[in-house]
Image (cartoon, coloured by chain):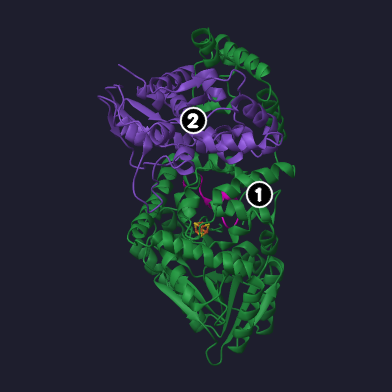
Chain colours: A green, B purple
Amino acid sequence: MSTSKLSHAEAAEQFIKDEPRTDWHDETLWFVRQKRDKAAHGLPEWEKLREWASQIKDHTLSNLDNYLLEFERNANANGITVHWATDGADHNRIIFDIIQQNNIQKIVKSKSMLTEECGLNEFLHAKGIETVDTDLGERIVQFRNEAPSHIVLPAIHLKKQDVSDTFHEHLHTEKGNNDPQYLTEAARQHLREKFIESELAITGVNFAVAETGGFVVCTNEGNADMGAHAAKIHIACMGFEKMIPKAEHLSVFLRLLARSATGQPITTYSSHFHKPREGQEMHIIIVDNGRSRQLGRADFRNSLKCIRCAACFNTCPVYRRSGGHSYHTAVAGPIGSILNPNIDMRANADLPFASTLCGSCSNVCPVKIDIHDQLWKWRQVLVAEGYVDTTKKIGLQGMAFVLARPGLYRFAGKAGRAVMRMFPWLLNNKLNPWYKQREMPAPPKESFRDWYIKNKQQ
Amino acid sequence: MKVGLFIPCYIDQFYPQVGIATLQLLEKFGCNVSFPLNQTCCGQPMANSGFAALSKNCDKNFVANFRGFDYIVGPSGSCVLHLKEHLHDEQHPGEAEHIRKHVYELTEFLVDILKIEKLEASFPHKVGLHNSCHGQRGLHLSSMSERMLPAFSKPQQLLSMVKGLELTLPVRSDECCGFGGTFCVFEEAVSVKMGKDRIADHATNNVEYITGGDVSCLMHLEGILKRNGSKVKTVHIAEILNSNA
Ligand code: SF4
């Protein structure tokens, strides 16, 4: 959800103003990246696992229609009701209908980036229905009326002090008590009440298995289980790309997911749901919301292989220094920057440019998404479709014009260097973003070419 | 062996000494080097900003300048990577393909093609190596911290032959410095923050110089170092490999 109307560059600049916090954010996520490295190094077959995961996903995406129908058949046979949603509004309406039909008041929700993408909390709130996010990090940002800033670590932009202040305000904990154990205990007591009261539990889905019609939800806090086991209705929400063909494929993905996400060998709870328990209702909502359009874009379909581990966030040097909210979308980071332009090109035209194309994201991705190549390709699409700044456009057009003409290039180079030498203040001013925090290179009298002609060409 | 010397536009204009060092180095190893006089730019600044469509004429000019060489060598990993991945010329597709397949970044050329095993260079200083992303992850000049593959480094291999040079690596050995082409101006704040962090990481090793295979990264780091009055200097790897201090 967008928390600001600023572009990535503007929001990032705001974030960096608090440099100690930026450093802390950077170091915390780098620590997670290092844990990931360690865990990956512990498996000699790591690169093979990535290759298998990538191939399974490729295969699934190429046969998605069949696997989705197979899943629906098997889920129905297990007594699960399957719904299909074309977009976020559809998804929210389906949930709202279930709430109304059952006259539900108390709802708990475990982490699901899809419900964020669809704006479920806001939608229900507007109808006077409150949902309680039960993931600790999500509960914290929910209290603060913020969006998660990271898909695995939703409150990673906050420090202990911030959490303490938030809990003091909402849970009446002691002011200034920053002890993590104390704060976690307070959250636990608070959430326990919510679990016990709850009538409806909403969860995400990490993997849906076509062969069995079941699905897997991974959490570290067990909150999805607590919700789903206590409530009389369980709704699981999934983007249609969460499909995998067979249960045996879980062995590949479950090994990759947690290691990539946090460096753990496996998430603390990998809960397998196959059918409603007696007296319970179980629903699955399978959401498109632009995914079929992305599937149809040859250059970008690969992005649908994503298993939402967030390794690309943690490794991204830009993400670490700009914070998740600067991406103004539910899914931030490198993967968000290639998924979101598909949803809304105009609103998210800045995101593919929020990268140096260093390529680290593609290297860590457990399903081998060519993230940085897709960023490059999105830039071409966005420019071609006209979603780019006019100043930038004029500048680059001018540059291309000069650089295609050797004589003009040499003239401009020489003139430019002369200007820089004689009138440095022309460039060394506030309008030049390079100069704001960096010196310009010292212009030499002669170019390499001048030197070459003088010294090498007799 | 006929080698076409490719000196990227900003090196030509602002860092001629890097071009000179590259040329002298190649000549030392017996290459028959020429510098086509009408070269300009590889087209990367446009393409990375989404304007690949505008770099057609640049490409054409490049092909016109560099056809007919056995190898094309340039002291810039990112420009070389761009050419390898994106150089096309509708009128001369074969020549463009030959160039794509035979364009080399300097250290890669020295190690893989010339198979250099010793150097006469000496550079008695404490030097930090900056691995530039496009060279490292794009051209595979060295192993990458994210991948679980055996460790190697072509630049490091060459620097280890330089007399007196004490090489150090920052703790985050291959994190991006934040230059990123037009990223450095359109995302100025993040770019500078990344550069500052790279410098801080090198500074803990008390380096006198930061070196690397891409002048663009070094120019960015140099700009920050100078602004902050640091004593640390930047120097292109070609200058070190060619030095006789
Ligand atoms: S793109 Fe890859 S690294 Fe990023 S969240 Fe998805 S699976 Fe993980």
Splitting the image into 4 quarters, where does residue A241 fall? bottom right
Query: What stretch of residues is rendered in magenta?
Result: A320-333
> Which amino acid is tagged 2?
Ser
Whether A330 is among the magenta residues is yes
Quadrant of the drawing holding the N terminus of chain A? bottom right
Is residue A282 rendered to the left or right of residue B240?
Answer: right
Residue indicated by mark 2: B76
Crowdedness near tag 1: few (<14), some (14–19) or many (≥20) residues, C-alpha within 10 Å = many
Whether the residue under disc 1 has CB within 8 Å of ligand 1: no
Chain letter of the residue beneath label 2 in the structure image: B
Is residue B119 or residue A315 the one in the foreground?
Answer: B119
Q: Secondary structure at mark 1?
A: loop
> Which amino acid is tagged 1?
Asn
Is residue B129 rendered to the left or right of residue A321?
Answer: left
Is residue B2 or residue A276 the one in the foreground?
Answer: B2
Q: Residue furthest right?
A: A386
Chain letter of the residue beneath label 1 in the structure image: A
Splitting the image into 4 quarters, where does residue B41 fall? top right
User: Which residue is rendered at x = 59% and y = 47% of the image?
Assistant: A375
Crowdedness near tag 2: few (<14), some (14–19) or many (≥20) residues, C-alpha within 10 Å = many
Residue B201 x/y as whole percent? 35, 37
Is residue A452 or residue B116 the one in the foreground?
Answer: B116
Q: Secondary structure at mark 2?
A: loop
Q: Which mark is residue A348?
A: 1
Cα separation, mark 1 vs mark 2, equals: 32 Å
